[in-house]
Image (spheres, helix red, strand yellow):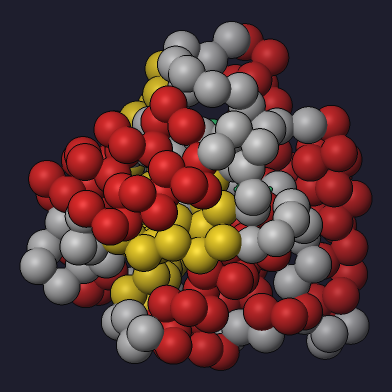
Amino acid sequence: MPTYDERENLEPMLRALGEVLGPDDRVLVIDDNSPDGTGELADRLAAELPFVDVLHRERREGLGRAYVAGFRVALRERAALVLEMDCDFSHDPKDVPRLIEAAAGADIVLGSRYVRGGGVRNWGLVRQLLSRGASLYTRVLLMPVRDSTGGFKCFRREVLERLDLDAIGSHGYMFQIETTFRARRLGFRIVEVPITFVDREVGASKMSLGIVLEAIWKVPALRLAALRGRA
Ligand SMILES: Nc1nc2c(ncn2[C@@H]2O[C@H](COP(=O)(O)OP(=O)(O)OP(=O)(O)O)[C@@H](O)[C@H]2O)c(=O)[nH]1
Ligand SMILES: [Mg+2]
């Protein structure tokens, strides 16, 4: 779980996860030296909650690098499944067991807003159009996935072992698109399970124009690279 300035959300989120996780499940908080003190709070909570660990990174290098750093720790700690989720309650901790269960029949499980039973709450029209537009764009150019930009996602460890994580330079939504696309090209099976995404109530979104532009040009770039056999 990557965090950047999530002081208000972190404690309720970790406690909510504690209610749903199994005895062998662990949570790794990946904090990029948040100015609001999320990292110190994470340490305090890790001292109290036995299922919590914290990875502190010195500075922000984009969300993609934070995920990759977390994946490496999870693989090293011999995780069989690695699940990523946001700390802002857009991803409901109560959905975590359903994603984990679905991984019994797939290599990647996507928490999906755009399959039957899924949806979005409290997003304005612009955000909805942007998100649906990005998924449609990706569906046309890259792969038959209905929600390709979501960050609520469960990987079997074999997927992360096979992906060349250093070669994934993307950061925002593109990171999600690229990991799924590359895994698909390697023959891994993907399923989408419905989730309802709820806009955050506290803290600020880190969404930016740069993240949107990155996806706009990198989606076709990834298609071209694949055609040339380089992705
Ligand atoms: N470690 C780390 N975490 C980050 C970084 N940027 C965002 N995050 C975390 O990643 C998760 C998703 O970020 P959000 O700000 O919710 O961005 P988003 O979900 O893409 O955008 P919204 O839908 O508007 O909320 C949250 O838990 C953030 O705290 C980063 O640079 N480093
Ligand atoms: Mg969010």
Residue positioned 84% across, 31% down in the render: 209
In the shown orientation, is residue 10 left or right of residue 96? right
Q: Nearer the viewer, residue 168 or 200?
A: 200
Image quadrant for the C terminus?
bottom right
Figure check: 12 above or below 224? above
Q: Between 56 and 202, which is closer to the camera in this rendering?
A: 56
Left or right: 161, with 14 as reference point: right
Badge count: 0
The spot of residue 49 in percent (x, y) is 21, 55
Residue found 27% across the figure and 66% down from its top: 26
x, y (%) of residue 126?
68, 14
Q: Residue 214, percent across and down? A: 85, 48
Q: Quadrant of residue 88?
A: top left
Q: Is 74 drawn above or below residue 134 in the view shown?
A: below
Query: Which residue is drawn at the image coordinates 32% and 37% (left, top)?
Result: 11
Q: Nearer the viewer, residue 109 or 89?
A: 89
Q: Is residue 80 above or below residue 178?
A: below
Ligand 1: which quarter?
A: top right
x and y percent of residue 15 in the render? Answer: 21, 41
Q: Is residue 147 visible?
A: no
| Identity of the residue drawn at 70% across and 48% down | 172
Give above or below for 221 relative to 13.
below
**Viewed as shown, does residue 87 lie left or right of 183?**
left
State whether residue 165 appears in this view.
Answer: yes
Residue 79's image quarter? bottom left
